[in-house]
Structure formats: C-alpha cells, structure tokens
Amino acid sequence: MTDMLVKAVLALALLGVAPATAQLSRRTFGGLPRWADSALVAAGLGRQFTLSSQLNPAYEFADFDGDGLSDVAVGIKDTGGLRYGIAIVHRIDRSVHVVGAGQPVGNGKDQLSWHASWGVASPRRGRHLAFARDVLYISQPGAHDGWLAWDGRAYVWMESD
C-alpha cells in the first residue's frame, strides 16, 4: 500500500511539472511563451532583428491592445546590432509590432537608446493616465521621455510633460 502511494504521488508530481514547461520557449528568453516566440520568428526574428537584453527590462507582459489578454513586449535590436527597439506581440492574433530597431518610433527617431529603460504603465493599477489600456513608458538619457500606446491600428508616441 505504501509503495502504491509513493508511485501515485510521484506520478502526480511529474504530471504537474510537464505542462508548464512545455509552454515556454527554449529559443528565446526563458520566460517567453511559445505563442510569442512563434510570432516573433514569423515576423523576422533572426533575419530582421534579434532579441536584446541590453534594454531594461528585457521583456514585459501587459494588455497593450485592450482585449483582456496579456500581450508581450520584448527588447530587440536590428540584425546589424546598431539600433535598439521594442517588439510588441498581441496575443489574440499573434501580430508583431516593431517600434525602433530601424522602424519609426514616432518621435522622429528610428531607434531607442541602448541606455533606455522602459516598463508598463497601467491605468488599472492606480496610475493616473489618460489611457484606457496598458502603455509602455520609455525613458532615454538625453531625449524626451514618453509613452507608446496602441491606437487600434499602430503604436503611437506621446511625449511626457
């Protein structure tokens, strides 16, 4: 009876671990789910841009498009390694939106400083912002700070006051 109990506990423990690790990507940062990884690869990861851990943070989860599902934003750089940016993956349709890394940021530039820091600002978490969904706050030395917000078609830049 004790032997069967031990086997049952071990079997339950192994079953509980396998599904969680099966959903995480092994090609990209350790915490990115497979849906985000596959969308990034389809959008040009490895050909047009690479993931970057230079920007701080490397990635963030939030509901950027306001559909109730967690999306992901990851720090990237172009394959030449010269221009930094952020790729935002919408979970609902796996669309990838690149800001910086050679694509327009919306503030007259096509890159973020490698010294840039960024994070999620959320009106649902008690912050006083005039946005209905989560946004990215970006701070760059020597440049104007601002927000990247989804307007329903694209990410737009809004400078902070």
Image (cartoon, helix red, strand yellow):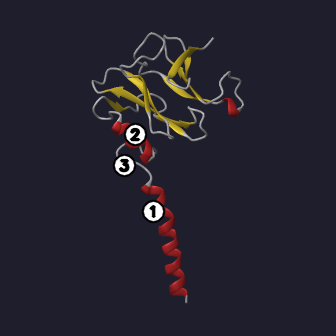
Is 141 left or right of 47, judged from the image as shown? right
Residue beneath label 2, please? 39
Q: Mark 2 or mark 1: which is in front?
A: 2
Q: Residue at x 42, y 12 (%)?
A: 109
Q: Position of residue 3 (x, y in %)?
A: 50, 86
Is 142 left or right of 160, judged from the image as shown? left
- Image quadrant in which you'd find residue 83: top left
Identify the secondary structure beneath mark 3.
Answer: loop
Q: Residue at x 39, y 29 (%)?
A: 76
**Label 3 vs 1, first from the N-terminus:** 1
Quarter of the image containing the N terminus?
bottom right
- Image quadrant in which you'd find residue 132: top right
Q: Nearer the viewer, residue 102 or 31?
A: 102
Residue type at numbered disc 2: Ala
Q: Position of residue 129 (x, y in %)?
A: 68, 22
Q: Residue at x 38, y 31 (%)?
A: 52
Relative to 60, residue 127 above or below: above
Residue beneath label 3, please? 26
Identify the secondary structure beneath mark 1.
Answer: helix
Residue beneath label 1, please? 18
Badge 1 crowding class, 10 Å Cα cut-off, few under 14, some 14 to 19, many 20 or more, is few
Badge 2 crowding class, 10 Å Cα cut-off, few under 14, some 14 to 19, many 20 or more, is some
**Label 2 vs 1, first from the N-terminus:** 1
Residue type at numbered disc 3: Arg
Residue type at numbered disc 1: Ala
Q: CA distance from mark 3 to mark 1?
A: 14 Å
Q: Position of residue 140 (x, y in %)?
A: 49, 17
The reply to whether callout 3 and callout 2 are in contact (CB within 8 Å) is: no
**Label 3 vs 2, first from the N-terminus:** 3
